[in-house]
Amino acid sequence: MNTLIPLEYYSLVYFNVLFLVVILLFLKSLKSDFSTKPTFGFIIFLFVLLYIGLRPISFVFSDMGVYNLTFEKYQQGEPIFSEKDIFFEYFIFYSSKIMSAQMFFFVCACLYVIPVYLASKKIFKEYWEYCFLMLVISLSFWAYGVNGIRNGIATSFFLYGISNEKKAVSILFVVLSFFIHKSLVLPCFAFFAVTFYNKPETYLKFWILSIPASVFLGDFFTNFFLGLGLVENERISGYLGELSDDLNASDLKIGFRWDFLLYSATGVFAGWYFIVKKKFEDEFYIKIFNVYLFSNAIWILVIKANFSNRFAYLSWFMLGLLIIYPFLKMKFFINQHQIMVRIIFIYFMFTYLLNVILSK
């Protein structure tokens, strides 16, 4: 357990360490290009894994305290009292029989961070560091490692699944992500949908149309999705309707979130620019772009609902990958390395602004 850093500064240290990394990368990019292989990746991986995994057990990290109470009840001999997200529930139950709570949260951190690391290496080989950095500096990565733990693990399993070239392994991890947290039904459905229909023009039109549809018919769509069997899980219903017991009132976001829409639009613009304008015909990239468009469009339709920021994460966890992917796969610009690093810097500054500067 990391007791050297006071709890009130724990998150702040995390973001400032990443700020230093991004600044150093920016300075290095002024003197080097892709011919110089990056060397920062494994250090960042260890830092993120250990810093998240060894954090003190505390309600300062919100849902972490709730998970700890569940863990302690199972340690004391109580039977499994929830059938929601069954895979993760059994994971807590059996973990409580063989390890301490601190070890349990470290294992959770491994299940969250390691799949992201492996997915980055599978997709980008020797330049995986750029993708891994882009993902861990994303707006909600920290929050879903220390607070929305099971949802974070589920999205990491999903990323590893879609990165795997072996179809059976890919499907296995995508399906597992659903059983870890049933809110993943949205990107999972999109993943299988784009397998059969993968034309970005159609999904892009759907995303654009979802904006006026939400502005004028937002309440209708919120009630519609609540009425579907797809949202039987009370945690998903909590995102759309009434407050759920395991969600924090501090996360409550109500009304049409134009700021969140603009943040989401960065991924849409990136995909449109490279696929349509630059004619980047990469099957995997087109697929993740379409999954992002579909998942994000559904969130836009319910953007006025409670906890829309949590629902938005069902597409946002792919955003860093979507923006960085073309830069690491094909040459588009003369000074591409410098351009990419500047985009990484701007991307992180949005995270820093919301999580550090505006959170004070």
Image: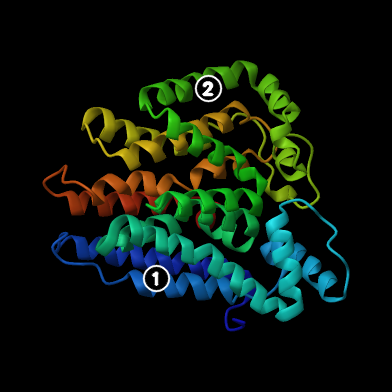
Q: Which quarter of the image is occupied by the N terminus?
A: bottom right
**Residue corresponding to mark 1:** 44
How many residues crowd around disc 1 within 10 Å: few (fewer than 14), some, or many (20 or more)? some
Q: Secondary structure at mark 1?
A: helix
Q: Is residue 359 visible?
A: no
In the rendering, which numbered label is found on residue 210?
2
Q: Amino acid at mark 1?
A: Ile
- Colour logic: rainbow
Going 68% across and 58% down the picture, which residue do you hit? 87
- What x and y, as percent, mark residue 212? 53, 17
Counting residues from the N terminus, which is met first, the one under dot 2 or under dot 1? 1
Mark 2: few/some/many CA within 10 Å (<14, 14-19, 20+) = many
Q: Which residue corresponds to the image point at 47% horizontal and 66% vertical from the top-left?
A: 114
Q: Is residue 71 above or below residue 359?
A: below
Image-based side of 96 in relation to 335, left or right: right
Q: Residue 266 — which label?
A: none
| Residue type indicated by callout 2 | Ser
| Foreground residue among 90 and 334 | 90
Residue 178 drawn above or below residue 131: above
Under tag 2, what secondary structure?
helix
Is residue 213 visible to us here?
Answer: yes
User: Of all residues shown, which one is farthest toward the left?
Assistant: 334
